[in-house]
Image (cartoon, rainbow, N blue to C red):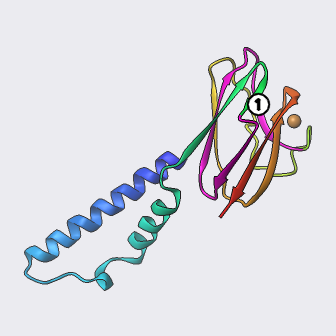
Amino acid sequence: MAVISAGRNRSAVKTATDSEIATENLGTKGTAADIPQEIIDAVAGEGMVAGEEKTVEYTAGGFTPEQISVKKGETVSWTNNSGKDMWIASDDHPTHRLYPEFDQKSKVGQGGTFKFTFDAEGVWGYHNHLSPADTGQVTVAL
Ligand SMILES: [Cu+2]
């Protein structure tokens, strides 16, 4: 997901560099106007995400940290070290309507992980759907 798009962005950057070199080899000087808009967008997108990923550990005692803040476009990775199954989902249990896309929609056991990239600003409460007393919160800002 985020990893795939970051890789594609890097390819786009490399293409731009190759294109500039090719232009110089032809004896003409490339300008900003020569760079395709899609490449400019790809580079801008990479800058916004900056490859950031924050981690939350799920233990027998709950989520640590229980509250985290990320920028829009950042990814949060949960690691299950609880000894029980983990199914991350936005509140409220059991409907998960707060942020329907923010729902693991399956479970992972001990040692498993779940990653989600937050594209919507807000304060998003979540819980382990299989143990709904275990709760956390992700604040997403621009
Ligand atoms: Cu639930």
49 relative position to 119: left or right: left
Q: Residue at x 73, y 27 (%)?
A: 107
In the image, 82: left or right of 130? left
Whole-percent x and y of residue 77?
62, 37
Q: Nearer the viewer, residue 87 or 140?
A: 140
Left or right? Give the position of 77 relative to 20. right
**Magenta range:** 65-91
Q: Position of residue 102 (x, y in %)?
A: 74, 46
- Asked if the beta carbon under badge 1 is closer than 8 A to the nearest atom of ligand 1, the reply is yes
In the foreground, 119 or 82: 82
Expressed as whole percent of the image width and height from the top left, the position of residue 53 reads: 55, 44
Q: Tell me, yes or no, whether the highlighted magenta stretch contains residue 81.
A: yes
Q: Quadrant of residue 38?
A: bottom left
Q: Amino acid at mark 1?
A: Trp
Residue 62 percent across, percent down from the top left: 78, 26
Q: Secondary structure at mark 1?
A: loop
Residue positioned most to the top: 83
Q: Is residue 48 above or below residue 59?
A: below
Q: Quadrant of ligand 1?
A: top right
Q: Residue at x 40, y 73 (%)?
A: 40
Q: Which residue is mark 1?
A: 87
Of 67 and 38, which appears nearest the observer?
Answer: 67
